[in-house]
């Protein structure tokens, strides 16, 4: 987080990226479990190659659908709070990171 912030990325950039990542991981996992090919998953997720799909499936291999769903819900909740409440953005993002790693 320190590295990304030092490079000039704001919390308003990082939150949607986290949310989108967990959305893609959940959708990729669900489609894979239903037997869809990497090529189909690539098209659904809007990737140009299947390499990101392979990385998503590798990353989510040890995660259950319920864990991914809960993580996505945390991201959506925290993103909504960040936009609608006056919070310390840095601490808020750190709290989300802690939730995601529990």
Image (cartoon, rainbow, N blue to C red):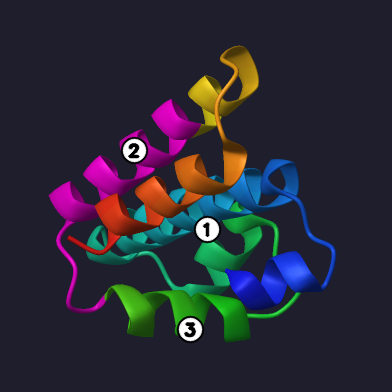
Q: Earlier in the sequence, mark 1 or mark 2?
A: 1
Relative image position of residue 65 (x, y in whole percent):
19, 53
Q: In the rendered structure, find residue 1 and report the number of the disc placed on it.
A: none
* Secondary structure of the residue carrying numbered label 2: helix
Magenta segment includes 97:
no
Given contact means CB atoms under 8 Å apart, are the residues at marks 1 and 2 in contact? no
Q: Which residue is mark 2?
A: 74
Given contact means CB atoms under 8 Å apart, are the residues at marks 1 and 3 in contact? no
Q: Earlier in the sequence, mark 1 or mark 3?
A: 1
Mark 2 or 3, closer to the camera: 2
* Label 1 packing within 10 angstroms: few (<14), some (14-19), many (20+): some
* Secondary structure of the residue carrying numbered label 1: helix
Relative image position of residue 28 (x, y in whole percent):
41, 61
Q: Which residue is mark 1?
A: 21
Magenta segment includes 66:
yes
Please report the residue visible at 32 percent of the width from the left and 62 percent of the height from the top: 29
Please report the residue visible at 70 percent of the width from the left and 80 percent of the height from the top: 49
Of the 4 image quadrants, the one containing the N terminus is bottom right
Mark 1 or 2, closer to the camera: 2
Please report the residue visible at 51 percent of the width from the left and 63 percent of the height from the top: 41
Given contact means CB atoms under 8 Å apart, are the residues at marks 2 and 3 in contact? no
* Label 2 packing within 10 angstroms: few (<14), some (14-19), many (20+): some
Q: Nearer the viewer, residue 87 or 21?
A: 87
Q: Earlier in the sequence, mark 2 or mark 3?
A: 3
Q: Which residue is mark 3?
A: 55
Please report the residue visible at 30 percent of the width from the left and 48 percent of the height from the top: 71
Residue 8 placement: quadrant: bottom right
Residue at the right extreme, as displayed: 8
């Amino acid at each position: 987080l320190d590295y990304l912030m030092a490079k000039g990325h704001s919390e308003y950039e990082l939150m949607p990226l986290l949310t989108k990542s967990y959305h893609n991981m959940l959708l990729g996992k669900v489609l894979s479990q239903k037997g869809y090919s990497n090529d189909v998953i690539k098209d659904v997720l809007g990737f140009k190659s299947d390499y990101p799909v392979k990385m998503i499936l590798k990353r989510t291999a040890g995660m259950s659908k319920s864990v991914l769903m809960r993580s996505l819900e945390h991201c959506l909740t925290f993103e909504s709070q960040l936009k609608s409440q006056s919070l310390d953005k840095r601490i808020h993002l750190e709290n989300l990171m802690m939730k995601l790693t529990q």
